[in-house]
Amino acid sequence: MIHQEFVTTQRGLNRQLPAMRLYEKAKRFGIWNPSDIDLRQDAREWSALLVDERDLLLRLTAMFQAGEEAVTLDLLPLVMAIARDGRIEEEIYLTTFLFEEAKHTDFFNRFLSEVAGQTSDLACYHTESYRRIFYQALPQTLQALLNDPSPTALIRASVTYNMIVEGVLAETGYHGYFTVLDQEQMMPGARQGITLLKQDESRHIAYGIFLISRLLAADDNLWPVVEDTMNSLLPDALAVVGEAFESYDPIPFGLDPDVFTHFALSQFQKRIERIERARGASLAEIYQVTHQVIENNDG
């Protein structure tokens, strides 16, 4: 396919679009280097933890590590689908996704090698529920965009990636991880990294909600695709949360699994309610709501 024209020399970039506002935030808050985070104290504190405490943190890290690698591997078809649709502003913002997911992969790899001292196979921590999402659903829905960039396929991919993987699992996982480290006042490097990761992910989720809302506003018949995709993946997502604690009695750090299951459900409900409000809304209304979310987002 050859180019017939270029947007930037025809009309220029529309810097008021939500994607460009997110791009500005990504340039301000997303340029951080995992190699700059000091993990030396984390390594000292790791060695003082009890066996089950180390195992739980290792389990969570192994899930984060593979999850971040998965989206780094599988994200490109989404960027390509948006590019083929001629939405240069959204494509520009999406270029930051790949960079940021790669950074997250880099950060967790540093933690595993420099703090936990792990270079062995950690796939034993990936349960069947985890595998159904990260080994199967995520690559299948994103890679499907290579041959089918339709609104239906875009919604399936974005719901899987932005709403379930990031909006339910990643946010719940980071919430649990940070809760442990913060209540114990330990591992300052990991806390710093998780804080920066959460800022990146919040921008990704904001875009995902915008993309799905934009597509729904254009065609309300796509709503069953949203519902079916979220509902089909939610049981496995909740199972992943619960399974993280099943191997421990008592659960390290005094954690209550119900707290994190409730958190995951509340994130799911919050996101689906926001997306449902796009039904029947105008594109101008979608932009206005998204701009408000972006302005209230601290990263």
Image (cartoon, rainbow, N blue to C red):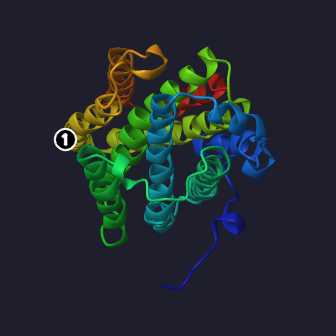
Near-viewer residue (240 or 30): 240
Say whether residue 122 is visible: yes
Q: Secondary structure at mark 1?
A: helix
Q: Is residue 141 left or right of residue 197?
A: left
Q: Residues within 10 Å of mark 1 (few under 14, many from 20)?
A: few
Q: Quadrant of residue 199?
A: top right
Q: Left or right: 268 with respect to 30? A: left
Tell me how many marks there are.
1
- In the rendered image, which quarter is residue 46 located in? top right
Q: Give the answer, above or below, for where 2 lies relative to 260.
A: below
Residue 81 at x, y percent in the picture? 43, 64
- Quadrant the C terminus occupies: top right
Q: Residue at x 59, y 34 (%)?
A: 198
Q: Is residue 138 left or right of residue 20?
A: left
Residue at 37%, 71% in the rendered image: 146
Amino acid carrying mark 1 in the image = Ser
Q: In this figure, which residue is indicated by the disc labeled 1?
A: 232
Instruction: Give the camera-side residue of 69 and 290.
Output: 69
x then y, percent, for residue 172: 44, 29
Residue 93, horizontal then vertical, whole percent? 62, 52
* Residue at 39%, 21% in the rendered image: 251
